[in-house]
Image (cartoon, rainbow, N blue to C red):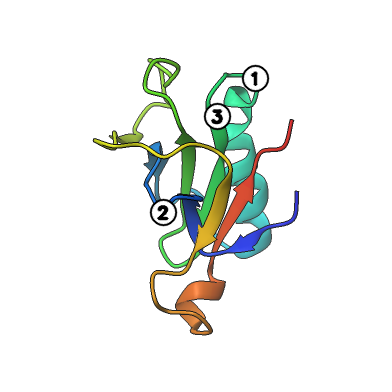
Amino acid sequence: MPPILGLCKAEDDKLFHEFEDDNLFTNGEDGERTCYEYCEPYEGVVGYVGFALDLPNKKCICYFEDSTTFPTNPPAGSATTMSSDPGSAPAKGHLDGNAGSEWSVRKMCYIYEV
């Protein structure tokens, strides 16, 4: 799956449920592999949308569209954010008004494709 610039957001601009952890890797190539492996156990879970790589914060984020299928056991040390009005797949990259800046190209959305 090729990455899309920005963090992941629903097509309707709503946020997904997510869990994340930071300081998990040291560089971009290592980060892509690390984030894939961090979220890979959830690829078979209904409602899994994909993951994001946040290079400046060395952060991996896993996204889900449905609270009923949100994992009850995210990786140890992960922070969880539940959206009050979650979006539905498909996902898109969201640049948060910083298109073309270094910030935007250092955050990538990887959409899970069945």
- Residue 42 position, x and y percent, is 57, 24
Q: Which image quarter: residue 82? A: top left
**Mark 1, secondary structure of its residue:** loop
Asked if marks 3 and 1 touch (Cβ < 8 Å), the reply is yes
> Gap in Å between the C-alphas at discs 1 and 2?
24 Å
Q: Can you say whether 91 is above or below 69 in the image?
A: below
Query: Could you say which is closer to the camera, residue 65 or residue 44?
Result: 65
Tell us which disc is closer to us: 1 or 2: 2
- Residue 92 position, x and y percent, is 56, 54
Which residue position is annotated with label 3? 48
Which residue position is annotated with label 1? 44
Q: Residue at x 48, y 58 (%)?
A: 7
**Mark 3, secondary structure of its residue:** strand
In this rendering, position of residue 95 left or right of residue 5: left
Regarding residue 75, the answer to whether it shows in the image is yes
Whichever of labels 2 and 3 marks the residue nearer the N terminus, that label is 2
**Mark 2, secondary structure of its residue:** loop
Badge number at residue 13? 2
Asked if marks 2 and 3 touch (Cβ < 8 Å), the reply is no
Q: Can you say whether 109 is above or below 36 in the image?
A: below
Q: Amino acid at mark 3?
A: Tyr
Q: Amino acid at mark 1?
A: Gly
Tell us which disc is closer to us: 2 or 3: 2
Q: Amino acid at mark 2?
A: Asp
> Gap in Å between the C-alphas at discs 3 and 1?
8 Å
Query: Could you say which is closer to the camera, residue 25 or residue 19?
Result: 19
Mark 1, other Cα within 10 Å: few <14 / some 14–19 / many ≥20: few
Q: Residue at x 74, y 30 (%)?
A: 114
